[in-house]
Image (spheres, rainbow, N blue to C red):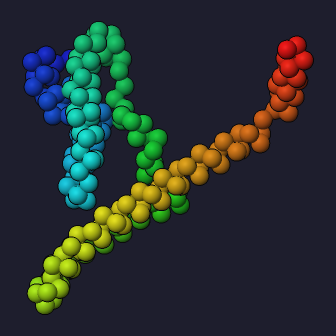
Amino acid sequence: MTRKKNGFWVFVFSFLPGAGEMYMGFMKQGTTLMGSFFLLVFLASWLNIGPLLFVLPVLWCYGFFHAHNLRSLSDEEFYGMEDEFLFHLDQILPKTKNIDRKSRNVMAVVLIVIGASMLWNNFGEVLRWMLPSYLREWYWKIGHMVPQLIVAVLFIAVGIWLIRGKKKELDEQEYWKDPEEEFQHWDSKEKGGDQS
């Protein structure tokens, strides 16, 4: 249940992204913030992607001020607030009862990549000790790059998929435009061109 709490404790808990929201009873908002924050830390360290850490201060500041903005709302506004996932996660994540084929495929790819990476790390360590000493260093360097390369390829593929989806959506919107509206648009351009 959401209710206004002691401002001092909101201040203390707000230093950890999401904890201030959870303290006030906004569990969905709090878990979204906290999960996003620690997911970024995990991905940056696991995949050795240092530039990803530049997002953390932004996310931290967002969480800190979000908790204080919630606390500073009037009683009427505060109690009228819905506890919803931040970043529209409820629209992005599939409903558990109705998981469509695309969502299942995406979840399957994510699970396969995580599982393959775990196998690679564990069996790779055993294999490394079985190799002759002159091959160990070479294998170690290559072995740590493979998970990063796989994730990089996945990021690129998802980016291309998103761009293609947006282009397809724009093409469909252009195709289904009202012909009368299009005619009026070109007619007004021609009239404007005659006046000059």
Above or below for 173 versus 143: above
At horizontal 65% and vertical 44% (from top left) the residue drawn is: 169
Task: Say whether residue 173 is left or right of residue 92.
Answer: right
Q: State the image quarter where residue 89 is shown.
A: top left
Instruction: Give the quadrant of the N terminus.
Output: top left
Residue 122, how many percent across, how many down? 18, 75
Instruction: Give the quadrant of the C terminus.
Output: top right
Residue 15, how many percent across, how many down? 14, 30
At horizontal 28% and vertical 47% (from top left) the residue drawn is: 52
Answer whether residue 130 is visible to the viewer in this image.
Answer: no
Q: State the image quarter where residue 31 is shown.
A: top left
**Is residue 195 or residue 111 the one in the foreground?**
195
Above or below for 96 versus 186: below
Q: State the image quarter where residue 188 is shown.
A: top right
Above or below for 101 versus 29: below
**Is residue 193 or residue 118 the one in the foreground?**
193
Residue 118, how many percent across, how many down? 24, 70
**Is residue 22 or residue 127 the one in the foreground?**
127
